[in-house]
Every structure is written in structure tokens, then in C-alpha cells.
């Protein structure tokens, strides 16, 4: 698929378009390792039908929804344009520095987008580490966080504090819009999480959508010798939750792409058909290989990367941060968690087996 996307880019705009699509693909890949790990942990809890839905309908949402329609929607709402005018403005291109261009309008909508995505991701991070876990990677950080999490509503309190801080970072002209966007980000998280409480565990013993936070956080829910896979309404709720996470991870890449090119076709090819397909391929590989169970710290590394991405998104409301830094932070946490997992597995392999009792 990546080769097809590059070929289409070359036919569309020649060597320059090919180069830009390749750069955007590399950018998206560098930002997507933590996304793939989180996706895989949720996807392995879905039955085969909903896994296929994520890999088919989900990729349409990822490529056309987030990389094409989402920027058009933001530009249309910001500039008060109808869909046709928004598309015409996008195809007209224009540099990010020129007022009134597609790239310029989307770039200036970044504070609201970052507030929504940053708060949504922050709530995922907090709910993961505020929960008491048998396995801990960074004990000196995760132990205190688990203790804080014993307080009822701890994640909500921290989220509201973060919201107040970013309100100050945004400056007087944007405070209202940023605060509202951050509130919507928190509401979206709690709404998707809370909808799960509408469903109960059925008679067959399948887990229900009320366990969405545990599933997303990597808690292993098992029947004898297998991970329980959900179906029906529970799987649909997981699918919605997964798409929300996937969309939140896309914000930084979509905004960052406009620093490279404002052409929506090249952005769709680079970020979508190359980057988003990479995330899907890596997600499927992790699920089929059972990598997350074999390397037990990867969940923790992915959620530390989520926390870092959330903080970076919130910081970018007032301070510009290069997308390369964002990508490297995610790769660092995943790589460090992988190395730590390998060392843990080696230690466990060297430990003598307990003597059999007679």
C-alpha cells in the first residue's frame, strides 16, 4: 500500500510530491509506535468480526476522516465556509504564513485541537497509572501515582488542574475557546468510558463495555487459557473507544503536516495511506504475535508515551514544539520499555523453578 501511495503521489505531482509524501509517511510512522501498542491491547479483546471492522471501516475513518475531512471541517467552521468552499480553499494551497490560506487557518486552530486531544489523552494516561497494578515498570513513579489514584476522582481533579493551566498558557484571546475544547476532550473521554456502564456481563461470561478502561489499560481478563474476546454492544463500545484514541493520536501529525505542505492530497497519501496503514500493520502484528503478553512493560511504555504526547500537545498551545521531538519521545518510551521487558524475561528465565511438592 505504501508503494501504491508513493506511486500515486509521483503521478499527482512529480518528484516533489513523491518526496513530500515520503517525508509525511516517515513523520507519521515516528509518531505511531505508541499508538500501535495501545491499539493492539484493545484490538486483541475484540472478536474477529470487530477486528476486521477496525482494519476496514477503521482505516477509512483514519485516512479520510482524520486526514482529509477533519482538517476541512476545522477550516470550514473557523472560516465559516461551506464544504465546497473549504475544498476549493484546500486545493488552492498557499503557504502557512499567508493569512486566509487553508494551512494558515488550520494552523491557527491548533490551540483548540491541542486542548481537546491533549486532555483526552491525559485522562487515558491518568486512569492507567492511577490504578493499582501488579506489574510496574518505573516503580519510583508508578507507585506514587497508584497511591494518588486511591483518592476518588483523582484523574478528574488532575485533569481540571491541567485545564486551568492551559487556560493561562493560551493567552487572553484564546482562553475561552481553549477551555471549552479541553472540557469537550474530558467529556468525550468520560462519555465513551461511561457509556460502557449501560451494559452488563452476559450469561456466557463475556466481558462487557463497562470494562473499557481496564481493557485499554492492559488488564488481562481471561477465561481458562485464553483472553476473553468481546462481541456485540461491548465490542462496538470498544471500537468507538479505539477510534477516539486513534483520532487523538492523529492530531499532532495532521497539524504538523501543514508545516511541510498544505496540499490535502499529499497529506492524505503520506499521513493516511503510508502512516495510518503502518499503524494497522503493526497493530495486527502485535496482536497475532502476542507481543504485548511476552514483553510486559510495553503497555507501560505506551502509556508513558501517551502522557508525554498529552503534555506536549498542551504545551504547544503556547509554545511551538517540533514534531520530530514528539515522535522521538514516543519512540524512546517504547524502545526503553521493550529493552526493560527483554531484561525482565531473561531474569525470569534464570530463576530456578519452585521445587515440586510431594
Image (cartoon, rainbow, N blue to C red):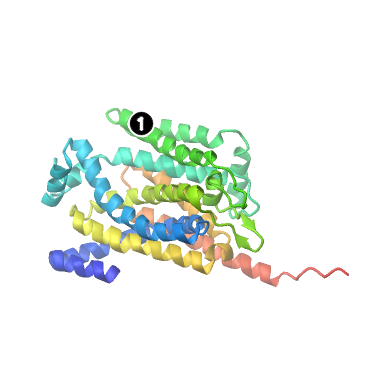
Q: Quadrant of the C terminus?
A: bottom right
Drawn side of residue 224 relative to residue 17, left or right: right
Whole-percent x, y for residue 88 in the image:
12, 47
The answer to whether residue 24 of the structure is visible from this angle is no
Q: On the rendered structure, is 88 left or right of 73?
A: left
Residue reaching furthest to the right: 358
Determine the secondary structure under disc 1.
Answer: helix
Which one is nearer the viewer's eye here, 103 or 98? Answer: 103
Front residue of 135 and 59: 59
Q: Quadrant of the N terminus?
A: bottom left
Tell me how many marks there are: 1
Can I make out residue 293 in this image? yes
Up-down relation of residue 58 to residue 70 (above or below): below
Residue 168: quarter of image: top left
Q: Decide: few, some or many residues near mark 1? Use Cα within 10 Å; few <14, some 14-19, many ≥20.
A: some
Asked if residue 91 lies left or right of residue 183, the reply is: left
Q: Position of residue 301 (x, y in %)?
A: 51, 56
- Residue 155, compared with residue 253, is above or below; it is above
Which residue is depicted at the point 21% across and 62% down? 20
Locate residue 270: give its quadrant.
bottom left
The residue at 16%/39% (across/down) is 82
Residue at 58% over, 50% down: 207
Horizontal arrangement in the rendering, residue 268 relative to residue 282 (left or right):
left
The residue carrying mark 1 is 180
Amino acid at each position: 500500500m505504501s508503494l501504491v501511495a508513493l506511486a500515486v503521489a509521483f503521478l499527482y505531482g512529480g518528484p516533489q510530491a513523491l518526496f513530500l509524501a515520503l517525508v509525511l509517511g516517515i513523520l507519521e510512522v515516528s509518531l505511531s509506535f505508541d499508538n500501535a501498542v495501545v491499539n493492539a491491547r484493545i484490538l486483541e479483546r475484540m472478536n474477529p468480526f470487530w477486528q476486521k471492522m477496525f482494519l476496514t471501516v477503521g482505516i477509512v475513518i483514519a485516512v479520510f476522516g482524520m486526514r482529509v475531512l477533519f482538517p476541512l471541517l476545522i477550516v470550514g467552521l473557523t472560516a465559516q465556509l461551506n464544504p465546497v468552499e473549504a475544498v476549493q480553499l484546500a486545493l488552492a494551497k498557499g503557504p502557512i504564513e499567508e493569512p486566509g490560506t487553508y494551512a494558515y487557518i488550520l494552523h491557527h486552530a491548533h490551540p483548540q485541537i491541542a486542548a481537546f486531544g491533549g486532555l483526552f489523552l491525559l485522562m487515558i494516561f491518568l486512569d492507567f497509572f492511577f490504578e493499582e497494578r501488579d506489574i510496574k515498570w518505573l516503580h519510583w513513579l508508578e507507585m506514587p501515582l497508584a497511591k494518588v489514584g486511591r483518592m476518588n476522582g483523582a484523574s478528574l481533579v488532575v485533569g481540571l488542574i491541567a485545564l486551568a493551566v492551559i487556560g493561562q498558557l493560551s493567552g487572553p484571546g484564546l482562553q475561552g475557546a481553549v477551555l471549552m475544547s479541553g472540557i469537550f476532550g474530558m467529556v468525550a473521554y468520560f462519555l465513551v468510558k461511561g457509556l460502557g456502564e449501560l451494559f452488563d456481563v452476559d450469561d456466557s461470561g463475556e466481558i462487557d463495555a463497562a470494562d473499557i478502561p481496564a481493557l485499554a489499560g492492559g488488564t488481562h481478563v481471561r477465561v481458562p487459557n485464553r483472553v476473553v474476546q468481546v462481541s456485540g454492544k461491548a465490542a462496538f463500545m470498544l471500537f468507538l473507544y479505539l477510534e477516539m484514541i486513534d483520532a487523538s493520536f492523529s492530531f499532532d501529525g495532521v497539524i504538523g503536516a501543514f508545516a511541510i505542505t498544505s496540499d490535502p492530497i499529499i497529506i492524505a497519501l503520506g499521513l493516511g495511506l503510508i502512516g495510518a496503514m503502518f499503524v494497522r500493520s503493526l497493530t495486527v502484528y502485535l496482536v497475532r504475535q502476542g507481543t504485548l503478553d511476552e514483553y510486559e512493560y510495553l503497555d507501560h511504555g505506551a502509556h508513558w508515551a501517551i502522557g508525554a504526547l498529552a503534555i506536549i500537545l498542551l504545551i504547544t498551545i503556547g509554545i511551538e514544539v517540533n514534531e520530530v521531538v514528539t515522535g522521538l519521545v514516543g519512540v524512546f518510551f517504547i524502545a526503553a520499555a521493550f529493552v526493560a521487558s527483554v531484561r525482565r524475561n531473561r531474569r525470569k528465565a534464570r530463576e530456578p523453578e519452585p521445587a515440586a511438592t510431594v
